[in-house]
Amino acid sequence: MKLLLALASTLLPAVVSSTSSFSFFGSDQKPLVNDDLSVPGDNPLTFCSNPSNYILTIDYVDLDPNPPQKGKTLAIKAKGNFTEEVDKDAYINLSVKYGLITLVNTKADLCDQMEAVDEECPLLGVKKFTKEVSLPKEIPAIRPMKGTFTVLADVYTKDEKKVTCLKAIATF
C-alpha cells in the first residue's frame, strides 16, 4: 500500500503536466463540456458534478472570511432557486474528512436544517438567507503539517432526486 501511494504521488504530477501538451485527437480538439464546477460567489465550494440537472440552482454563496478561519465568525450569504418542490423527508448526506480519515458521516433531515436559517419546507422558488457561524479555535491540525478538511454535502428529495451536491476543501 505504501509503495502504491509513493508511486502515485511521484507519477501523478508528471502525468498531469504532460497531458496539456499531448492529445490523442490533435491540438485543435476542444472539450465537450465545461468542467469548471465552481459554485458562483466568493467561496471555495465546487459542485460534485455538472449542476444542470440539480433541483437547486445556486445564484451565489458568499463566505466572509473566505477561506474560513478557525476561531473566527463565518458569515454565509446565499441565494438560489428550487425549480421543483422539496418537501419533508428530503435529506443531506454529510461527510467530513481530515485527509483520508472520515470524521463525520451522517444523514440529516434537510427541513430540520433549513429551520436554522429561518426557512421551512416545502422549499420552492427563490430562497435567500444569511447565517453566521462561530468556528472553534480548536479545529485540529497535525504538527508540523496543516490539516486539510474535505466536506461533502449531497442533498436528495425523499424520492431520491438530486437537489444539489457541494464539496469544499479547507486547510487550517
Image (spheres, rainbow, N blue to C red):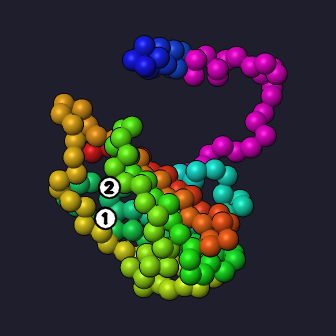
Does the residue at mark 2 contact the one at mark 1 (Cβ under 8 Å)? yes
For the C terminus, the image quarter is: top left
Question: Disc 2 or 1, which lies upstream in sequence?
Answer: 2
Q: Is residue 123 visible?
A: no
Nearer-the-camera pick, 108 or 119? 108
Numbered tag placed on residue 68 in the rendering: 2
Residue 70 visible, this orientation: yes
What amino acid is found at the position of numbered circle 2 in the picture? Answer: Pro
Distance in Å between CA atoms under marks 2 and 1:
6 Å
Instruction: Classify residue 25 by image quadrant.
Output: top right
Q: Residue at x 53, y 51 (%)?
A: 46
Residue found at x 17% / y 53%: 138
Where residue 24 sits in the image (x, y, percent)?
Answer: 78, 18
Up/down of 147 relative to 1, above or below = below
Q: Which residue is mark 1?
A: 74
Quarter holding the N terminus? top left
Type of secondary structure dominating the magenta stretch? loop
Name the residue type under label 1.
Leu
Q: What secondary structure is found at the residue carrying circle 2?
A: loop
Percent of width and height locating residue 63? 39, 62
